[in-house]
Amino acid sequence: MDFGQVPIGSSRSLSFTLTNTGNIPVTVTKAKAPTGDFNSPVQLSEGLVIGPEQTAVQTVTFTPRSAADLNAFYEVTGTGTDANGNAQGAMYVPIKGTGTGTATTTSVADGQWRTNGSAVPADGGGVQLTPATANQAGTAVYGKPLRTDGLRTTFTAKFGPGGGGKGMTLALLDPDQNSASALGASGDGLGIAGRPGTVIAFATGWNNTLQAQNFVAVGRSSAGSSVIGYQPLVKLGTSLRQGTHQVDVQIDAGHVYVRIDGTQVLDQTVTLPPSALLAFSGGTADTPDVQTISGPVVSEAPLVQNPKAATSLQLTAPATAVPGRSLTVNGTLTSTAALPAGQVVRVTRNGTALREVTTAANGSFTFTDTPSAEGTYTYAASYAGDATHEAASSSGLVQVAKLPTSVTLSAPATATRAKTLTVTGRLSGSPFASGTVVKVTKTDLAHSSGVALADAQVAADGSFTFKDTPQVGGANTYKVSFGGDVSHKDGSRTATVQVSRAATSLTVATDHGTYKYGQSAKVTAHLGTTYNSRTVAIYAQPYSGTKVLVKSAKVDSHGNLTASYKLTRNTTFSAVFTGDYRYAPKTVSRAVHTYAGVSEKLSGYYTSTTVGSTVYRVYHSTAKERLDVTVSPNKAGQCVKYRVQRYYSGAWHTQSTSACAALSSSSTGRQQMSLTNGVNNRYRVAAQYVPSSRDNTNISTWGAWQYFTVRR
């Protein structure tokens, strides 16, 4: 038997069935009902005979007094036997249920009750309202007013033993006219008449005025009256004095509902104050009963509050901010119910409390903060709410980062050495704090790693100025560096000023203007007055070749530097003075020409002879003279001519000059001449390299004369 969940102070009744499945009657020899939260006001009768195929139904009522899982058994023993003829013995019906919720009170002994008159505490938290003594009145009053709407009271009532009794009540007394010591009249006054309030009466004795007994009714007790004025009463079919009864009284929306042993017996409309003092009362007359309340459970309905008004909090924070600078966050607190000015809003930054701010009449509020470093900041605002307004909160993220710093500089393009110049500049991202400076360094010919100048003070708007008097000519580069601060990143910029230098004299000369192929040129550079550098470099730039350094050194005491360079093609020599602290750089140049190299070789002769100091090659008239020529550098495809002269009449006379012949890929050429008619004559032959307009490397060059004579 599972009652499931039952709220504390309420009751639920379930039944189980006993069935005789045999063919002879069975007698119930023992029936033991559970007690406490589970009970049976009308228990199964011992001695009950259940015939074959007949049943008996037993009701159990669950009235939880605590929030817990509860269990019990209903024990039944009969004369039945099992299939083997053995006695069945005791059978147990398992019972369980769960109490839920909370109870206001479950015991008259909990310190909140007061007993008056004939009432005395009884075992198990109950109270004996009257003894079996005539004309008694007793009450047990709960000392705190309880809300009447939703109030529920359950208890077990027992009338007797005694001679007939009168009855008891559950009273709801006016708290303004009663106290915990309230006690009324005995007899038909049921121990409560005369105390202002509403009573639910359970009468057992005969009431002459009503001409009724054994009834339930709702009545009104008035101050000073010895009787109760009842509304229509309900006569009960079951005697209240028979056994115990589980009583459940519930007040809901102006109605009083009364259930006895799980059956509703009364539904009466009443007018009750918002709160009342709850009391049990009992009274006796000439034929008294002991009247007892046990297992009381009183549950006051939770206080029903009107729902709080919805509240909204909006927070508007800037998306970005700068460390060290104040930011402003705006917010608005609104509600569906009016909110007066001055509501307190608590503000945090990354979970740390900042301050409390109050709202204006329109719900707006503002707060400021100055983040100290870069990072992500969460600003949160919360309103705690009040009795009529819900709480609300909101938050906003702010990304805090330093400002990038750009540096602008304005400096003159040129300046005069030893004269003061002015450089101005500005840092972006103003304002700047007082005392902010920029570092200034200068790099010049004398300070290749830079030299520090005085710091420049930065104004609030980021502007700055510094002056310098350069002593070294040439490029003076000023670097301005800002190291950053709490609000700004670092930054730097350079500006270069060309500072004036005096001009010096510089010349370059060669010992010749034209040179043979492979001949070395003597090159002389002459440097005039300078300040702290006397070094000159001499370079050679062969036509279409790579410029090479011939020599770099200090000039001699006369200002001269001499070098030698071997020529193979037209070449430009340059002398370079790179300048010094006070004199400007200077470069001068001189171009020289170079002949090509023409080498010649005769072949085909049979001997040699000498005429004077000149060597002649001797040919037979039947042979051919052959001249092989090589031109350097390689002049493949260029022009070579050959000239032959004969000696007679005391002089050399040109016999022939050939047309251009193209040099081979290896820059060679060949000339031949028949000697049949040249017996006893002396000859000479030479080759001439003739450059085309495409060749600017060398100038036109004659080879040396090659001498020969002819014999038979």
Image (spheres, grey):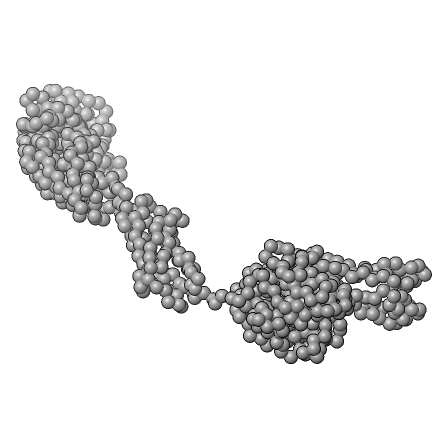
Height in image: 177 above or below 643? Answer: below
- The reply, left or right, for residue 47 in relation to residue 240 is right
Residue 417, given in percent of the width and then of the height, sits at: 7, 35
Residue closest to the eye, 197 or 528: 197
Q: Residue at x 73, y 66 (%)?
A: 289
Residue 404, given in percent of the width and then of the height, sits at: 26, 47
- The reply, left or right, for residue 397 in relation to residue 577 is right
Q: Residue at x 7, y 20 (%)?
A: 557
State the image quarter where residue 545 is shown. top left
Indicate the quadrant containing the N terminus: top left, top right, bottom left or bottom right.
Answer: bottom right
Q: Residue at x 28, y 43 (%)?
A: 486
Residue closest to the eye, 258 or 218: 218
Q: Is residue 241 visible?
A: no
Q: Is residue 365 visible?
A: yes
State the image quarter where residue 505 is shown. top left
Residue closest to the eye, 657 or 480: 480
